[in-house]
Image (cartoon, rainbow, N blue to C red):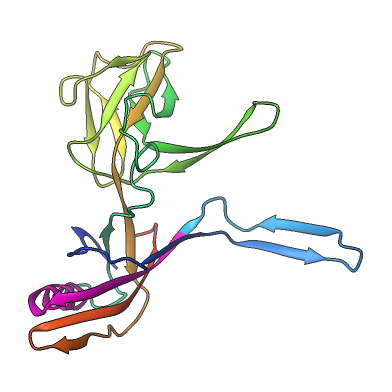
Amino acid sequence: MTFYNAVLPGFISQGSEAAPVSLVDIARGPTGYEQRRSRRSRRLRRFNLVKDIRTINDIYDLLAFFEVMNGPQHSFAIQNLADYKSCKPADTISMTDATIGTGDGSNAVFQLKKQYKVTKIDSSVIAIDRTIYLPVSGTVLIAVDGVLKAETTDYVVNYSTGVVTFVVGHEPANTKVVTAGFHFNEKVRFDTNDLSQVMEYIKVGSAPSIPLIEVLND
């Protein structure tokens, strides 16, 4: 099991599916009373991608990718077009999209996170964090107390883990809020041992179903 930081090639067609999957046990009694217990805190994504009519070379690139990954053995990166930014997908990222920590004057290490929020009727907000492991190089914005910082001068980013490390002497001061904006990819593997390809016409093909599942441990 190895993670290869390479993005699945080609364009995703209309009709592709993406779903966050919870793992909640539900015991329901005859009166309608329920007990619910979540077996994990994070929703893992499941995908079924479609690549409609493509040139034979496009289909070959997909085949080569499947061969190198040995089907489901190794993991790789994809961009989920429904959720690939620190903000909504149609919005522009900003340096204050997500809160990733608060300075104490000495801590230099912060993990990139995205917040999902729901506003209740009383206007209070419920929010959960999602750890981001694969930020896209060149897109990360980091701010301390609303002031934009400069990558390499003030901090560095590990683009394989999503860890932001401030340079010595640039650690966020006590009580200063650290925020971030970014694009990100998701770590997945093929969720099948075989990959169907259809020859539609001469030198034209398609891949009607490419099942993928998110992984965290590679």
Relative to 43, 5 lies left or right: left
| Vertical order, 183 against 105 (above or below) | below
Quarter-wise, where is residue 132 in the image? top left
Quarter-wise, where is residue 69 in the image? bottom left
| Vertical order, 25 against 195 (above or below) | above
Position of the C terminus, as image quadrant, is bottom left
Q: Position of residue 146 (x, y in %)?
A: 35, 14
Front residue of 23 and 62? 62
Q: How many marks?
A: 0
Q: Which residues are magenta?
A: 45-67
Residue at the image point whose x is 36% and y is 67% from the top? 16
Relative to 203, 144 lies left or right: right
Q: Position of residue 131 (x, y in %)?
A: 42, 43
Relative to 154, 105 lies left or right: right
Q: Position of residue 89 (x, y in %)?
A: 36, 43
Q: Position of residue 170 (x, y in %)?
A: 26, 15
Front residue of 43 and 82? 82
Tell me if residue 46 is in the magenta stretch.
Answer: yes
